[in-house]
Image (spheres, rainbow, N blue to C red):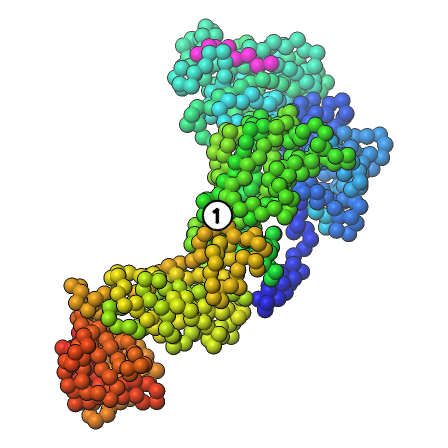
C-alpha cells in the first residue's frame, strides 16, 4: 500500500512539470519542397488545380507548397478553448508573409474560398501568421476524409538557401517543429520530383518538373541526361534483372508536358538509353549505360513567363543488391552537338525511396520491462485489465506502398510461447473498408474500422481475457482504393514465471508480403536466488543448508499480501527450522514477520507484509533440512515461488497458507495462464554417502584465528565473526559455525542429541557437548583432553583438538596468540 501511494504522488509531481504541449498529437509534413528563384511569391492553390497530395500535379512554381498537419487519435483540441484550434506559423530569414495573406480563408484542402471558409488566417507581422479553425468544422470535414489539414504556404522567398516554416502549437495539441518548404536555386533551371513514391523492386515515378529560373534560360533545343545511382536502371521494353543485360532496347518513352511560359509551344521529345543504338547512330560508339537516360527537347520558345518542362511516367527498377533509402537522380545538360544546348543545370534531387518492407511493422514507445509471473490481481481476486505494469509498446502495421497489404487475408501477430496476451486495445485504424451496413450514422469510416477490428479480437468486449500468445484478424473489404492501410494496437502481456528474454511480436500471415518481427517488451526474473550447494550426508537426519539469498530485480518484485514460498524436493526431505531471516534494508525494503513464517513438510511460507520502496535482499539463515532416510544421491533444487512472486499460474489443490491464491479467490480462474509455479530452481544441496569416492569439502586453504578478535583470515582475506575465540583450559575455543572455513563443510547441529557433526575427507566426525570423545561415522574415534561447551547460547569447540583428530595441520603463534589451520 505504501508503495502505491508513493508512486501516485511521484506521478502527480512529474505530470505537474510537463507542459501541455508535451502531449502534442499531430504528424507534420511538406507535400513537396520546390526549388525556386529568389523573390518567388507563392500563390494560393486554386480549386481548379488542386489535387490530393499523393498525386499532386502542380501547374508551375507559382503554386504554393502544401503543409500537411495530420491529427493523431482525435486530439485536435485547444487547452484554453476546447471549441477552437489556433496555432502559429513563423518563417525564417529567407521568407516573409505578404500583406495579402491577412484575412484570407481556405478550406481544409488548402483551396482559397471567397467566403468565410473553415480556416482563417491573421497576419501578425511579416514573419508570423496565426491559423485558426473551429473543432466543429474540423470534425465535420474528417467524416469522409483523412485527418489532415493541407495548408498552402503563400509566402515570398526573399533570401538564398532554405526557406523554413516553424509550427508553434501555442498551447494546442499540435506537434511543433520546423520544415523546409522551398529552396532557392542559383542555376538556369531548378528540377524536382513532385512526389517520392516508396517501392522495393520497381516503381513509376511522379512528375519530374524542370523550371526555368528566369524567362528564356532554356533555348529552342535542349539536351540533358537523367542519371540514376548504381543498382538502379531505367525500365524499358526489353528488361533483365542482370545488370549487363538490363534495358537492351534503346527506347524509354515517358509522357511529356509543358506548363507556364511554354504553354502553346509545339514541343517534341526523344529519349533513349545512353550508348544504345539510337544514341550511337549520331554520336559514334559510346559505352552503353542503362542508368543514364538521354532526353532531347525541340520547339521551346520564350514567353512572358518562365516555362516548365514536365516528364511523366518514367519507371525505374532496382537490382537485387541495390541499397535501401532515398533514390536521387542527377540531371545535367549535355549538348553534344551544335543542334542542342546544355542549359539544364546540374542538380541532384530525390525521386523515390527504396524500402525493405512494403508493409512496415514498427513500435511506438520503448519496450516495456515486465516481471515474469506477474499479473495485476486486484484485492477481490479479479484481473486489473489495463495495468501499465504489463502494457507493451504499441504495435503499428502500415502500408508503405498501396495494395501491398492484402488485409482480406489473415494477419497474425504472434508472441513467444512463454508469453500470453491478457488484453488488448485497438488504438487506431485507417483506410480500411468495413462490411456494408456496419458503419453507424455519424460514425467515421476509420472509427467504424477500429470498432470492427476490436470486435474481432475481443469477443466479450473490453472484459475479454485472451489467454493466448497470438491474435488473428482480417478486413474482408480490403484497403480503401489508392490509400494505405494502417492498424495500431496495444497488448497487455504476462510472462510465464520462469521465462526471461525479449517479448517479440512476429507479424505474419497470408496477408503479409514479408514476415517481420519487432520487440514490444522484455521479461525479467523478479528475483535472483543465490545459494552455495551444501553436501548432505546420508545417515545424518538434521543438516543445515548454506544461506539462501533472494535479491529483488527491482522494488516491489516481492508483492505484498502474499507468501514467498521455498519448496524442497519431496525426495530430499522436509524443512525443520531456520535461524533467522535478514533484510538488508529493513527501513525501505520488504517487511517480513519471522513469527508468521509457516513450515509444512517440504514447504516454507514466508509472508510479505509490505512491498519495499527499494529493491531488497532477503537472506534465510540456518535453514535446517530433515533428510529422508534413503534419499538418492545427487543434486537437489530449491523451488522459489508463491503468490508474492507468481500470480499467473494454475494451482491444482495446493494446501496450506497458499490457500490465499485458491481458485475462488482469483476470479474463478480468470488469472490462470500457465502451469508454472516457480520462478527459479537453483541447486541447493548434493546428497552424498559417507564413503563416496569423491572427496567432500576439501579446498586447500589457510585459516587463522586470534584470541579475543572477531576478525579471522581465510587465505589471507579478512572475514568477521559475531563472537571472538577464547582460551579455556589452555585450549583455543572457536564458534562451531566457523568450522566450515577450516574443513570446507558446513557443520550440523542436532539439538536433540546436542551433537556437532562435520564431514571431512568423506568421513562424518561428531562431538557431543560435555563429551571428550570424537566419533567417526557414528563410532568412537578419538579421545581429547577438552570438551565442546556452550557459552551464552553459542556452541564452542576445541579447534586444535578437533583438527588433530581429523588430520588437519595447524600451528600456534604464542606471541600473537594466533592459530593457523592448513588443509
Instruction: Check the image and report above or below for 749 versus 727.
Output: above
Describe the element under mark 1 as helix, strand or loop: strand
Residue 14 on the magenta span: no
Relative depth, front residue between 524 and 784: 784
Label tally: 1
Q: Position of residue 482 (x, y in %)?
A: 63, 25
Extent of the magenta region: 248-255
Q: Quadrant of the C terminus?
A: bottom left
Instruction: Check the image and report above or below for 38 versus 292.
Output: below
Q: Position of residue 290 (x, y in %)?
A: 45, 17
Residue under pointer 1 = 419
Residue 214: which quarter of the image? top right
Question: Is residue 684 visible in this depiction of the protein?
Answer: yes
Q: In screen coordinates, is 474 left or right of 709?
A: right
Relative depth, front residue between 670 and 66: 670
| Residue drawn at 39 percent across, 61 percent down | 639
Question: Is residue 615 visible in this depiction of the protein?
Answer: no
| Residue drawn at 18 percent across, 82 percent down | 774
Relative depth, front residue between 641 and 453: 641
Q: Residue furthest bottom?
A: 729
Amino acid at each position: 500500500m505504501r508503495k502505491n501511494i508513493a508512486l501516485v504522488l511521484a506521478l502527480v509531481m512529474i505530470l505537474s512539470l510537463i507542459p501541455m504541449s508535451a502531449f502534442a498529437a499531430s504528424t507534420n509534413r511538406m507535400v513537396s519542397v520546390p526549388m525556386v528563384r529568389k523573390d518567388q511569391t507563392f500563390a494560393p492553390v486554386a480549386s481548379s488545380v488542386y489535387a490530393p497530395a499523393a498525386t499532386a500535379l502542380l501547374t508551375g512554381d507559382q503554386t504554393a507548397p502544401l503543409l500537411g498537419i495530420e491529427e493523431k487519435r482525435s486530439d485536435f483540441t485547444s487547452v484554453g478553448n476546447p471549441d477552437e484550434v489556433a496555432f502559429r506559423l513563423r518563417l525564417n530569414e529567407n521568407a516573409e508573409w505578404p500583406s495579402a495573406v491577412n484575412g484570407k480563408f481556405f478550406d481544409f484542402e488548402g483551396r482559397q474560398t471567397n467566403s468565410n471558409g473553415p480556416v482563417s488566417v491573421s497576419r501578425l507581422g511579416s514573419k508570423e501568421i496565426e491559423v485558426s479553425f473551429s473543432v466543429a468544422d474540423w470534425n465535420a470535414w474528417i467524416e469522409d476524409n483523412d485527418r489532415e489539414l493541407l495548408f498552402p504556404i503563400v509566402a515570398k522567398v526573399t533570401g538564398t538557401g532554405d526557406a523554413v516554416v516553424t509550427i508553434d502549437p501555442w498551447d494546442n495539441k499540435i506537434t511543433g517543429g520546423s520544415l523546409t518548404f522551398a529552396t532557392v536555386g542559383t542555376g538556369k533551371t531548378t528540377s524536382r520530383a513532385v512526389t517520392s513514391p516508396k517501392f522495393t523492386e520497381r516503381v513509376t515515378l511522379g512528375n519530374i518538373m524542370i523550371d526555368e529560373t528566369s524567362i528564356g534560360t532554356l533555348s529552342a533545343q535542349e539536351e540533358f541526361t537523367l542519371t540514376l545511382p548504381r543498382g538502379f536502371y531505367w525500365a524499358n521494353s526489353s528488361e533483365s534483372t542482370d545488370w549487363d543485360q538490363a534495358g537492351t532496347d534503346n527506347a524509354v518513352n515517358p509522357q511529356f508536358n509543358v506548363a507556364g511560359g511554354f504553354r502553346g509551344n509545339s514541343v517534341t521529345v526523344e529519349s533513349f538509353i545512353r550508348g544504345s543504338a539510337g544514341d550511337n547512330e549520331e554520336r559514334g560508339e559510346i559505352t552503353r549505360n542503362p542508368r543514364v537516360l538521354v532526353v532531347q527537347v525541340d520547339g521551346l520558345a520564350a514567353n512572358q513567363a518562365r516555362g516548365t518542362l514536365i516528364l511523366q511516367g518514367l519507371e525505374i527498377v532496382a537490382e537485387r543488391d541495390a541499397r535501401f533509402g532515398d533514390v536521387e537522380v542527377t540531371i545535367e545538360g549535355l549538348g553534344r552537338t551544335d543542334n542542342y544546348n546544355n542549359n539544364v543545370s546540374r542538380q541532384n534531387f530525390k525521386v523515390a525511396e527504396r524500402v525493405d518492407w512494403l508493409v512496415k511493422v514498427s513500435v511506438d514507445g520503448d519496450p516495456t520491462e515486465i516481471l515474469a509471473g506477474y499479473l495485476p490481481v486486484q484485492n477481490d481476486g479479479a484481473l486489473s485489465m489495463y495495468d501499465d505494469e504489463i502494457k507493451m509498446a504499441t504495435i503499428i502495421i502500415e502500408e508503405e506502398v498501396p495494395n501491398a497489404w492484402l488485409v482480406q487475408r489473415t494477419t497474425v501477430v504472434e508472441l513467444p510461447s512463454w508469453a500470453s496476451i491478457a488484453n488488448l486495445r485497438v488504438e487506431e485504424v485507417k483506410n480500411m473498408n468495413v462490411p456494408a451496413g456496419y458503419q453507424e450514422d455519424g460514425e467515421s469510416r476509420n472509427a467504424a474500422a477500429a470498432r470492427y477490428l476490436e470486435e474481432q479480437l475481443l469477443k466479450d468486449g473490453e472484459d475479454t481475457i485472451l489467454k493466448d500468445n497470438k491474435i488473428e484478424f482480417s478486413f474482408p473489404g480490403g484497403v480503401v482504393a489508392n490509400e494505405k492501410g494502417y492498424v495500431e494496437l496495444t497488448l497487455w502481456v504476462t510472462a510465464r514465471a520462469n521465462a526471461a528474454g525479449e517479448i517479440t511480436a512476429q507479424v505474419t500471415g497470408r496477408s503479409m508480403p514479408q514476415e517481420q518481427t519487432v520487440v514490444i517488451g522484455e521479461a525479467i526474473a523478479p528475483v535472483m536466488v543465490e545459494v552455495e550447494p551444501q553436501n548432505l550426508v546420508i545417515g545424518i537426519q538434521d543438516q543445515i543448508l548454506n544461506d539462501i539469498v533472494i535479491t529483488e530485480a527491482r522494488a516491489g518484485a516481492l508483492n505484498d499480501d502474499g507468501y514467498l514460498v521455498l519448496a524442497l524436493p519431496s525426495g530430499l526431505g522436509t524443512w525443520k527450522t531456520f535461524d533467522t531471516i535478514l533484510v538488508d534494508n529493513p527501513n525501505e525494503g520488504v517487511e517480513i514477520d519471522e513469527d508468521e513464517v509457516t513450515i509444512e513438510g517440504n514447504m516454507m511460507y514466508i509472508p510479505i507484509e509490505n512491498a519495499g520502496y527499494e529493491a531488497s535482499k532477503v537472506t534465510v539463515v540456518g535453514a535446517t533440512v530433515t533428510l529422508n532416510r534413503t534419499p538418492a544421491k545427487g543434486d537437489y533444487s530449491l523451488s522459489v515461488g508463491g503468490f508474492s512472486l507468481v500470480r499467473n499460474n494454475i494451482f491444482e489443490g495446493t494446501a496450506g497458507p497458499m490457500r490465499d491464491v485458491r481458485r475462488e479467490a482469483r476470479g474463478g480462474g480468470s488469472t490462470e495462464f500457465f502451469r508454472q509455479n516457480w520462478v527459479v530452481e537453483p541447486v541447493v544441496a548434493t546428497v552424498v554417502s559417507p564413503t563416496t569416492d569423491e572427496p567432500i569439502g576439501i579446498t586447500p586453504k589457510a585459516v587463522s584465528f586470534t584470541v579475543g578478535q572477531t576478525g579471522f583470515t581465510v587465505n589471507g582475506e579478512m572475514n568477521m565473526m559475531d563472537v571472538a575465540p577464547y582460551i579455556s583450559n589452555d585450549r583455543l575455543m572457536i564458534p562451531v559455525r566457523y568450522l566450515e572455513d577450516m574443513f570446507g563443510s558446513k557443520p550440523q547441529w542436532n539439538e536433540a542429541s546436542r551433537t556437532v557433526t562435520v564431514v571431512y575427507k568423506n568421513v562424518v566426525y561428531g562431538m557431543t557437548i560435555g563429551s571428550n570423545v570424537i566419533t567417526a561415522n557414528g563410532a568412537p574415534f578419538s579421545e581429547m583432553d577438552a570438551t565442546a561447551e556452550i557459552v551464552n547460547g553459542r556452541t564452542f569447540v576445541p579447534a586444535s583438538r578437533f583438527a588433530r583428530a581429523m588430520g588437519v595441520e595447524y600451528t600456534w603463534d604464542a606471541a600473537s596468540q594466533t592459530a593457523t589451520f592448513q588443509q
